[in-house]
Amino acid sequence: MSPLQSHAPSEKPSVAPHALIGILAVFLAAMNSSLGGGLIGAGLEDLRGVWGLDLDAAVYIPTSFNAAQMFMGPLSIILAARYGHRRVLLYAGGIYILSSLLLPLMPPRAIVLILLVIGGLASGTFYPLALSFISRNLPVQLIPFGIAAYTMDLIGSNHIVHALEGFFIDYWSWKWIFWTPAILTLPMLLCVKVGIPVTPRDQLLPKCIYGEMLYVSGGLTMLYIALDQGERLDWFNNGLINGLLLAGIILLVIAVLKRRMDPYLVLDFSYLKSRNILILGLLVFIFRVVLLRVVALIPLFLETLQHYRPPEIGHLLSFSLIPFLVALTVIADLLRRVHVRLVLIAGFFILAVINFYDSHALSTWIGDDFIIQQMVGAVAICMAILGTFSGVVFEGRITGAYRNRAGAYCQGAFFQVVRLFGGQLSASGLRRFIQVRDHFWQTKLVSGLQSGWQFDGRLAHLGTALAPQAAGPLQRPEIAAGLIAGSVKAQAFTLAIDDSFMLLALLSAVAVLAVFMMTPIPLPHQLPDAAPTKT
């Protein structure tokens, strides 16, 4: 029997001796994983000014960090199999702190990009290994609270990142964009050291075969970069995008062929054949799309039409912080008594309703017009994300995937890829959707402006009203036409955003239908504990 085969059967996972501290470690790991990239994205314009970068150079700042996280997501499970979760997190956390502290002190361009990649690789281990700790090492009665801590990264990436970045720029320094995650990583390392158990040596792989996962990580990363830069570089009309897409597909095909010819036994993909697991993967993807209402749609609407600055957007989003935190603990406790499917149906149904309501937004809406939807949506987001990842962990316990490392690593890698890759795919797709719908509505509105008496009359009335401000009689109709053209653009953009909200509403309805197709998932007290039964 080969060394890999000897580690494939079920083995007893270590139960965390200080589970509550482990849950705190999960929260800090998930927060740091998303806060670093979120602050870089929110502060990109300020970083451009500080480092004197043009647009083409600046866009690769967040891409390099996020792509490195994408690369490390699948690969981190192999590192954990070889060296243990605790050890990998401690080393990765130390590297992340060092790279984040050095970043603001370095000149831009090459050195900054290298440090961003190093920081992204280090923080890319946080999220998947935190989920693995919840799934394998927590007692069943604490699983909902572990998942609540795991999903609190939404606070960092969606609710406070704009406000934090604006506060740093206005009152402190842009350097805190990098130093804040570094400081938060220090208590994370302490909690990891105390709360996450050491993996017994006999449960670690004696050696690692990285080939298959390197192909997967490399292929997904190239596709990720292509999706991130595709809209800016005009997609298939650009050689770089075509090369990245082709190389990514080739690497993924090689990974599949390599697995068929020489299977790597530390990964067991049979646990992905469950109907519930596939539906939960779909729900994770839909959730990442729907979450763009907070990450992209509302900020873009207010920035473009009302000229809001990041601190003002952060102030709006912070209104949903309190209901989010309250709902998080209440729903985590509720999941101990209420079936996952009911929570999922309620969450996605509410998201469908509020997105449908926002699809009737007017160009005159300001931040206050979104407050009620944001507060209600915060509760719905909690229900959707907690229900989804609770279903993931509960289903893993039912099928036995988390009772051996082969299944746990496979499911952990699967959902990490869906989370990261699905998030980027949805963001790129939504940007393209808005652009297409904006062009459609501009064309439709302009085509409706006939040169009849109504349009000509409006120009004449505007010209007369603008006479005191115009330099001369010839400038009056030009100014009036410019105002009308600006109004047309604003209305077309508003209609494009409305269409985007409607798209999110339809996807939320699809999620509700998908939940009805799931088979029942037991409550936590009906699940097997971390330790498997002897065979």
Image (cartoon, rainbow, N blue to C red):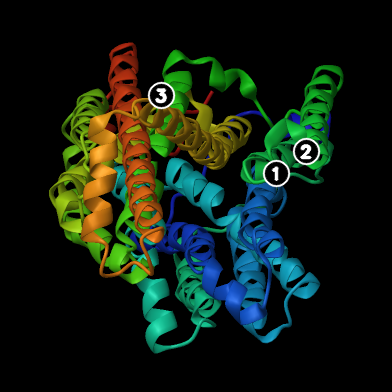
Identify the residue at image location x=44%, y=81%.
169
Identify the residue at image location x=43%, y=35%.
438
Identify the residue at image location x=74%, y=35%.
216
The amino acid at mark 3 is: Ile
Residue that badge 2 annotates: 238
Circle count: 3
Quarter of the image for residue 223 reads top right
Residue that badge 3 annotates: 398
Q: Answer with mark 3 or mark 1, whichever residue precedes in sequence.
A: 1
Q: Answer with mark 2 or mark 1, whichever residue precedes in sequence.
A: 1
Residue that badge 1 annotates: 233
Do the numbered discs 3 and 1 sit on residues whose CB atoms are within 8 Å?
A: no
Up the image or down, 372 lies above or below 341; here it is below
The amino acid at mark 2 is: Asn
Up the image or down, 391 lies above or below 274; here it is below
| Relative image position of residue 198 (x, y in whole percent) | 57, 58
Q: Nearer the viewer, residue 187 or 43?
A: 43
Q: Quarter of the image containing the N terminus?
A: top right
The amino acid at mark 1 is: Leu
Q: Answer with mark 2 or mark 3, whichever residue precedes in sequence.
A: 2
